[in-house]
């Protein structure tokens, strides 16, 4: 109970901080109440743990032109790194664009937070503004889980996303390197990537999708076909499984009972004291629900 309250307080605290970031501040005028102070831009450094890695030059140039005309609309959130020096928590894009605009100082909000909270804030800010590409978002989630022991449920509460969203994001990290590059570069969408992540050859399917300009629905159909072909050649469908009329009444009844409970097609191939249990799913959402029913608390 206390842990739940702590998580809710953390979520509210992060949301409040993100709300503060939205207040306008102009570097040409005295800082408003939303900024703690103005600091020399050379005293601010980037956070090496920032999940965002890609900053499109054209976007930075557009923002720098806006900053030259209107100033920094949102203060950069930082924490103290050393005496008179600061490390960015949120707002690296604004900091980069301010450098391009030739500013000598920028407005900042100073927060005294540890590494974990700094990473949480960075992810929350970027996710809420859709600044992260799908791969960066997944890598940020993985970093919180690996370094700080978050479960997917905990992470969903802190970030403000569903567990299903977190789980589906993390699955993207299973893609081959060349497919992840397509995803990071925006050549392949997250919907396409989620559809093919569990297929036998994601790289080949990704190339077909990009070359053919295929839709997400097309990708899902290709993935379904791949799954069916893999099942037919992978030894899972034994002769008895392919011929359900050879099964005894008890096995057929058990298959029907499990299918009704799970909402997914279940097949049993029973031989002697052992056998095989096959559960078919068509979407990642169905797989995620199956994991939930089986008590997966990752």
Image (spheres, rainbow, N blue to C red):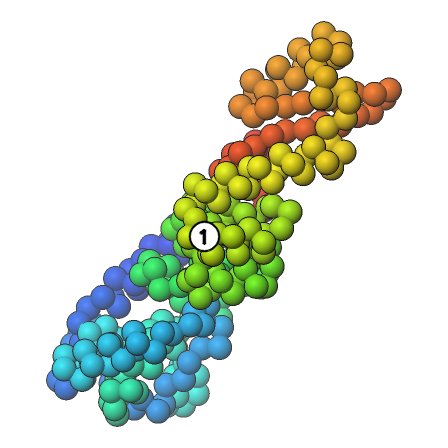
Q: Residue 105: where, in percent of width, then height?
A: 26, 89
Q: Is residue 275 left or right of residue 216?
A: right
Along the viewing direction, whichever of 3 and 164 lies nearer the viewer: 164
Circle 1 Cα neighbour tier, 10 Å, few/some/many (<14 / 14–19 / ≥20): few
- The residue at the point 68 percent across, 12 percent down is 252
> Looking at the picture, does residue 109 appear above or below residue 127?
below
- Residue furthest top in the image: 249
- The residue at the point 45 percent across, 72 percent down is 53
Q: Is residue 60 left or right of residue 205?
A: left
- Residue furthest right in the image: 272
- The residue at the point 58 percent across, 54 percent down is 204
Looking at the rendered structure, the number of numbered marks drawn on it comes to 1
Q: Is residue 256 left or right of residue 72?
A: right
Along the viewing direction, whichever of 52 and 8 lies nearer the viewer: 52
Quick check: can you spot residue 200? yes
Q: Residue 32: where, in percent of width, then height?
A: 16, 77
> Looking at the picture, does residue 174 appear above or below residue 246?
below
Q: Dividing the picture into quarters, in which one does residue 14 lie?
A: bottom left
Quick check: can you spot residue 36? no
Q: Dividing the picture into quarters, in which one does residue 149 lie?
A: bottom right
- The residue at the point 27 percent across, 80 percent down is 61
> Looking at the picture, does residue 283 appear above or below residue 261?
below
Q: Residue 64: where, in percent of width, then height?
A: 24, 81
Q: Residue 253: where, in percent of width, then height?
A: 66, 11
Find numbered disc 1 in the image and state the secondary structure of the residue it sits on: helix
Q: Dividing the picture into quarters, in which one does residue 102 lie?
A: bottom left
Query: Which residue, given by chain and number where applicable, does mark 1 sit on?
Result: 212
């Amino acid at each position: 109970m206390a842990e739940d309250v702590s998580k809710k307080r953390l979520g509210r605290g992060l949301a409040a901080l993100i709300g503060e970031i939205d207040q306008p501040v102009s570097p040409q005028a005295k800082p408003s109440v939303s900024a703690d102070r103005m600091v020399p831009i050379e005293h601010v450094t980037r956070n090496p743990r920032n999940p965002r890695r890609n900053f499109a030059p054209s976007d930075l140039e557009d923002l720098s032109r806006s900053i030259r005309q209107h100033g920094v609309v949102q203060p950069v959130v930082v924490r103290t790194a050393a005496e008179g020096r600061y490390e960015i928590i949120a707002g690296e894009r604004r900091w980069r664009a301010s450098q391009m605009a030739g500013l000598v100082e920028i407005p900042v909000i100073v927060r005294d937070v540890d590494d974990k909270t700094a990473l949480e804030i960075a992810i929350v800010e970027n996710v809420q503004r859709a600044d992260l590409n799908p791969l960066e978002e997944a890598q940020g989630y993985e970093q919180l889980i690996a370094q700080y022991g978050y479960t997917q449920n905990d992470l969903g509460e802190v970030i403000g996303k569903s567990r299903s969203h977190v789980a589906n994001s993390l699955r993207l990290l299973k893609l081959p390197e060349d497919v992840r590059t397509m995803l990071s570069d925006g050549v392949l969408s997250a919907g396409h990537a989620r559809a093919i992540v569990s297929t036998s050859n994601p790289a080949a399917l990704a190339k077909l999708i990009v070359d053919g300009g295929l839709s997400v629905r097309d990708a899902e159909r290709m993935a379904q076909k791949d799954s069916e072909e893999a099942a037919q050649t992978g030894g899972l469908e034994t002769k008895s499984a392919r011929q359900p009329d050879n099964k005894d009444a008890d096995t057929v009844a058990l298959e029907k009972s499990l299918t009704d409970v799970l909402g997914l097609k279940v097949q049993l191939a029973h031989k002697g004291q052992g056998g095989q249990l096959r559960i078919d799913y068509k979407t990642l959402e169905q797989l995620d629900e199956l994991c939930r029913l089986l008590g997966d608390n990752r």
